[in-house]
Each structure stands twice: as structure tokens, then as C-alpha cells.
């Protein structure tokens, strides 16, 4: 199995590193200083359990230097980066190859291969012009959910927050348990990342949405971790109300999330205090992954008649923050950097 990690940031880099160490045929696509560090010294993984004692000598290439075809492409990009890369991803794929799309948020394929009156509906927030649906072969797509807090601390060095429940969840869009899912599991799991094969990938997407749609925008606006939000009583009340909206939208499309808002909020107090990916992007001055994480939920609510007023407030202000970053080049340095 020839594997490509298209977007070897924090999680993609972690997967590429452990697969390389396990002897898999894997190529990592990286840019700029991160590529330079990977090519020069290899990949450094730091973490209490997932860390490695020495740099891993990975095969890293720049975009455009890949040698196709690849049997499996793991796309480590953010959801808002998919459209501009969709054509390249499709061109790199072997004829019977598979693409794992594990991005946070509501995916563009949500209503594909789904037994629902909404089958085929397109969400304007995540694929406004239908580019993704028209470019990446739908039969190649495997849905994914990442449970692995990670941070690209510096080029070539990934910091991992090992927690109970760390795993990669994968599933077919039509709910079948297929040989290709089991084959992917047989490659990734022995390398060190547990893999759960599911017949209901959408349920797992919604469970993670209960966290992402709330903690990511609030965290970006307040410079706070999920643990800090869950531990502050006024912020907790707002977060709980937003989670209730997420649950109501999920129910409207036939998904019951197997966790209550209080359980999710209580669980934050057991988490390692690591910034969300959205907060990391604010601090790095990068465009924010808001459409799939927040606006996709709002879009589905509009399709099914479920009001989401609190999510819309959070989306509006986080969207304004995103425009400041994109249009004005604005960024917030973390406190440690400001003191240095």
C-alpha cells in the first residue's frame, strides 16, 4: 500500500511519522520551513506515550513533487483548504485508491450515499460551488474522525497530548464495513494509533461536533482552552446552550449524540490544556476553519427548521475575527511568546 499524507501538519505529520517508523511506504507533503526541517533532520514527536526518542527520517516532498499513484491518501488539510487542493488530490489517487477525509466539522459529503429525503443536498458553507463533490470521486472517499490532540510546536516538531480515547475513526459513507477499511486499520493500528471501524461515521462526526462547534469559536474569541471554558461558570452556561443547539440539529437528521452537554463539559476538566486547532490558527495568523465547524451546523438547521441563535452569534463574531486575520494580517501571540 503506497500511502500519501497530503498535509503533514500536526496530526498528518504524526501519522506519517509512526507509519514510517513501522516500515510503511509513506510520503509526507509539507511546505516551507516545515518541509525544510523534515528533509534536513526528520520528524520529532514529543509526548508521554506517543513520543519517540530520536527523529524519524521521513520521506518528505513539496507540493507538486509527489510520485503518483497512491493507494491511500490521508488528507491532513483543514476543511477550508480542500477546494483549492481537490484537483491535485484526485490526480494523485490510484484508480481504485481511497481518500480519508478526517477534517473537523460537517463534511461536504454529509448527504451523499445517505438514506434520507435530504440525500444529495449541498451545504453552501462547505462546498458552495460543488467543486469538491465534482472533483474527488465519491466512491474513493472514506469519512474520518480524529481523536488525537496535537500541536505543531515548531517546524519538524510535533507535540502530542496523549489521552484516553485517542484513536482514528473511519467509516464508509453508506455504512458498510468493507475490506478496505479493515486493510487500512491493519496498517495504521500496529504503528501505534488505535483505529475504530464504524458503520455510522456520521454519529461520530456529530459527537465531535458537540465539542468543536462550541469550544473552537469560543476558544478563538476568548483565547481559552476547552478546560478553561468548562471551568468558568458563565462561559459554561453559554457553551451548554450552544451544545443543546448542536444536539437538536443532529436529532433533526436522525442522529442521537451519545453524550450530554454536562458530560462533555465535565470531561473538559480531565483534558490536557492544549489550544484548539482554531485557537492555534488565531495565534499563527492563519485563516480559521469556521465554515465546516460552525456554519455547517447552522446550514443543516436551516434545512431542517431547527433554530441555532447562539451558534449564529458565535459564528458571526468568529467570522469577523477571521476577516481581521485574512484581510489585515492580524494575529494574537500567546502569552509565553509576548513575555519572551
Image (spheres, rainbow, N blue to C red):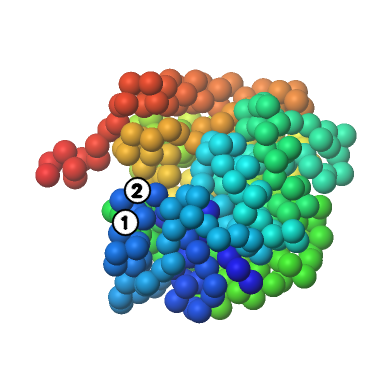
> Is any part of residue 26 visible from this angle?
yes
Residue 81 x, y percent position in the rendering: 53, 39
Return the x and y of residue 145 as percentages of the image width and height: 60, 54
Q: Nearer the viewer, residue 194 or 287?
A: 287
Tell me which residue sits at (58%, 65%) in the image.
Answer: 3
Residue 283 screen position, x and y as percent: 31, 37
Q: Is residue 103 above or below residue 44?
A: above
Q: Quadrant of residue 2?
A: bottom right
Furthest residue in direction left, as rendered: 340
Residue at 47% in and 73% down: 20
Give me the disc on residue 265. none
Few, some or many residues within 10 Å of mark 1 (<14, 14–19, 20+): some
Q: Quadrant of the C terminus?
A: top left
Q: In which quarter of the image is the N terminus?
A: bottom right
Q: Is residue 289 above or below residue 136?
A: above
Query: Could you say which is closer to the camera, residue 69 or residue 209?
Result: 69
In this rendering, position of residue 33 left or right of residue 25: left
Image mark for residue 32: 2
In this figure, which residue is indicated by the disc labeled 1?
Answer: 36
Q: How many labels does the image show?
A: 2
The residue tagged with tag 2: helix, strand or loop? helix
Q: Is residue 136 above or below residue 70?
A: above
Residue at 71% x, 71% y is 182
Q: In this view, does 84 lie to the left or right of 249?
A: left
Q: Is residue 205 left or right of residue 280?
A: right
Residue 59 lies, in percent from the top left, at 44, 67
The answer to whether the residue labelled 2 contacts the one labelled 1, judged by CB atoms less than 8 Å apart, is yes
Q: Residue at x 34, y 53 (%)?
A: 34
Q: Quick check: 306 above or below 337?
A: above
What SS does tag 1 mark? helix
Amino acid at each position: 500500500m503506497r500511502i500519501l499524507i497530503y498535509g503533514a501538519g500536526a496530526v498528518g505529520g504524526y501519522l506519517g511519522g509512526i507509519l514510517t517508523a513501522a516500515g510503511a511506504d509513506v510520503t509526507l507533503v509539507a511546505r516551507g520551513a516545515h518541509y525544510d526541517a523534515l528533509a534536513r533532520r526528520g520528524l520529532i514527536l514529543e509526548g508521554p506515550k506517543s513520543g519517540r526518542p530520536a527523529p524519524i527520517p521521513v520521506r518528505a516532498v513539496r507540493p507538486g513533487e509527489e510520485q503518483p499513484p497512491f493507494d491511500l491518501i490521508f488528507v491532513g488539510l483543514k476543511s477550508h483548504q480542500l477546494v483549492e487542493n481537490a484537483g491535485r488530490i484526485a490526480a494523485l489517487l490510484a484508480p481504485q485508491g481511497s481518500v480519508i477525509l478526517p477534517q473537523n466539522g460537517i463534511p461536504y459529503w454529509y448527504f451523499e450515499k445517505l438514506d434520507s429525503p435530504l440525500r444529495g443536498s449541498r451545504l453552501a458553507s462547505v462546498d458552495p460551488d460543488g467543486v469538491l463533490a465534482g472533483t474527488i470521486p465519491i466512491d474513493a472517499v472514506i469519512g474520518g474522525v480524529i481523536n488525537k490532540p496535537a500541536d505543531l510546536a515548531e517546524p519538524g516538531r510535533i507535540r502530542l497530548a496523549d489521552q484516553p480515547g485517542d484513536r482514528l475513526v473511519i467509516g464508509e459513507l453508506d455504512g458498510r464495513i468493507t475490506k478496505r477499511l479493515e486493510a487500512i486499520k491493519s496498517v495504521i493500528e500496529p504503528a501505534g494509533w488505535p483505529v475504530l471501524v464504524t458503520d455510522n461515521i456520521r454519529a461520530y462526526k456529530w459527537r465531535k461536533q458537540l465539542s468543536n462547534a462550541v469550544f473552537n469559536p469560543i476558544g478563538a474569541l476568548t483565547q481559552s482552552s476547552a478546560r478553561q471554558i468548562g471551568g468558568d461558570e458563565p462561559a459554561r452556561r453559554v457553551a451548554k446552550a450552544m451544545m443543546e443547539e448542536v444536539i437538536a440539529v443532529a436529532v433533526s437528521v436522525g442522529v442521537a449524540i451519545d453524550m450530554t452537554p454536562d458530560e462533555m463539559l465535565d470531561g473538559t476538566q480531565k483534558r490536557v490544556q492544549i489550544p484548539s486547532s482554531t485557537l492555534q490558527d488565531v495565534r499563527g495568523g492563519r485563516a480559521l476553519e469556521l465554515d465546516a465547524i460552525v456554519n455547517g451546523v447552522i446550514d443543516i438547521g436551516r434545512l431542517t427548521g431547527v433554530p441555532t441563535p447562539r451558534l449564529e452569534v458565535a459564528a458571526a463574531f468568529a467570522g469577523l475575527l477571521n476577516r481581521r486575520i485574512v484581510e489585515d494580517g492580524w494575529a494574537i501571540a500567546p502569552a509565553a511568546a509576548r513575555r519572551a
